[in-house]
Structures are given as structure tokens and as C-alpha cells.
Amino acid sequence: MVTETRFSAIAISDLVHQYNGVAQPAVNHLNLSIPKGAFYGLLGPNGAGKTTTISIICGILKPTSGNVSILGKDWKTDATAIKKSIGFVPQEIALYDTMTATENFNFFGQMLGLDRKSIAKKADELMEAFGLSEHRGKQLQNYSGGMKRRVNLMVALLHGPEILILDEPTVGIDVHSRHMINTYLKELNTNGMTIVYTSHQLDETEKLCDQVCIIDNGKLLIEGSTAELISDGHSLHHHFIELTGKQLRD
């Protein structure tokens, strides 16, 4: 069981999630401790339990059993405070295509409890940082995939969260957009934001994340410093295959 300390951003203790009608639990007595200020890679093959774990951390799913603590708070008693502290970027684009970027910011910002003045100020800052200022009046259906990915991330940053959780944030996008997003994430982390990051791009993960864990079948296989894990001269990709096997996943 994870021993939670004041230095934990996220503490997961004996977490289980069982979907109805499925024999094996998606998350199977998982224990993790994610330190404040970490750039943390949550890794695993398809079906390993990553997205289920993230959904529980974000309060989207309720666990079958076990506990998740966010900055020392519990979803059962401190949901409002936790929502303010977390930004979530889902794998699928979670935006309205027939709305402009500005309209999306206003919609989601108000859902987060922000006033229009605060939304406009933060949106201007983010649009400038992500090179989209001249496109603010276009509907998102006219954006490229990379541009949509940038806006998807920007929406999660509107309220200035302490923890940012990203589920495959750069999947299927161009090299330049990926570089821009990753550079900005590193800057956020350098300035103190805790980032939890899932990706199948293991070379990218190795460069970005200072700590990683690998899970499979809902169970923890390994957790620790990225530098220590690859100190034997093998890449993160090598260790991933060694731990999870070579069998193809659905």
C-alpha cells in the first residue's frame, strides 16, 4: 500500500476497478505515488488499465474499491477543490467543431467557474503561446488536427491547474505541433506543474518524463526514475517489451 506524504500530488492505494460483465478487473490492486512537481509517465500496452486509472483519478469513474488522493484530498469529500486543481486532456478531441476557439474557451471556462474577463485574459495568453492568435475566429472544423490538439490542451489549462493529466496528447499529429506541445509541457513542469502523461511514443516519453511506471493487466510492473531505469544502457522501449512481452494487443 502507498504511504501518502505531503509531497504526493496523487496517491493511489489498492485501487480496483471491475467493469460489469468482464472477468478480469481493468485495474487490479494498483498502488502508485506520484510526487508533486513530477513529469510522470503512466505507461502500458493497450488494455493495460491506463485510461481507466486516469478516469478514476479525474473523478469520471468511481473505483470498485481502493482510494485515490489528490493533493491530500478525497473525491468523496473534496470534489469541488479537486476539480479546480486538475486539468485533463483526453485522447479524443473534446471540443465543439462548429464553435470557434474563443467560443470553446468561453463555454468550457464558464463550466469551470471562470468569469469572462479571466477566460479572455488566459485565452489570449494561450493563443499567443501556441501560435493560434490569427485563427481565433475560425470554427474548429476548419482547423488541422495539430491545431485542434493544441486547443484541446489549452482548454485544460484555462483555470491554471496544479496537476495536468494527458491521455495520448500528441497522437496522430504533425512533427511541428508535437514539438510545440512537448516544449510547452516541459516549461509548465519546470515552473512546478505536476504532469501525468500516457503515450505509446516511448522515445518521446523517455525524453519528457523524469519518472515512469509500467502497468499491465491493471497491475504495476515497475515504477521509478527514468534515469535509473535506463542506466543499464537499455532504452525505455527495451524495458517495456521485456516487462510486457511481444504479444500483439487489441
Image: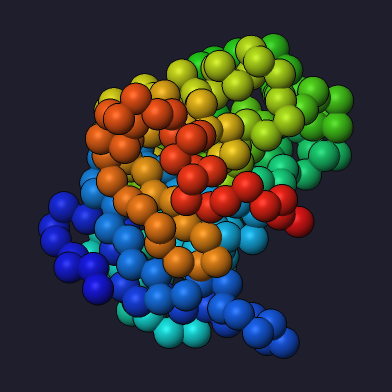
Q: Please give the name of the residue rendered at 47% of the width and 57% of the height, measured from the top-left corner.
A: 215
The structure's colour scheme is rainbow
All told, the count of numbered labels is 0
Q: Position of residue 77 (x, y in %)?
A: 33, 79
> 168 or 72: nearer the eye?
168
Q: Position of residue 28 (x, y in %)?
A: 47, 75
59 horizontally vs 85: left or right? right
Locate residue 75, reporting x and y percent. 38, 73
Q: Quadrant of the N terminus?
A: bottom left
* Foreground of the two, 89 or 114: 89
Residue at point 45%, 66% (across, down): 219
* Residue at the image point whose x is 77% and y is 27% from the top: 145
Figure quadrant of residue 232: top left
Q: What quarter of the picture does the C terminus occupy?
A: bottom right
Q: Who is closer to the viewer here, 234 or 75?
A: 234
Residue 21 x/y as whole percent: 72, 87
Position of residue 21 in the picture relative to residue 184 (left or right): right
Q: Can the viewer see residue 116?
A: no
**Left or right: residue 227 compared with residue 125:** left
Query: Where 153 sits versus 7, above or below?
Result: above
Identified at 52% across, 60% down, the residue is: 216
Residue 191 as seen in the image, left or right of residue 62 = left
Q: Quadrant of residue 31?
A: bottom left
Residue 95 in view (yes/no)? yes
79, 219: nearer the viewer: 219
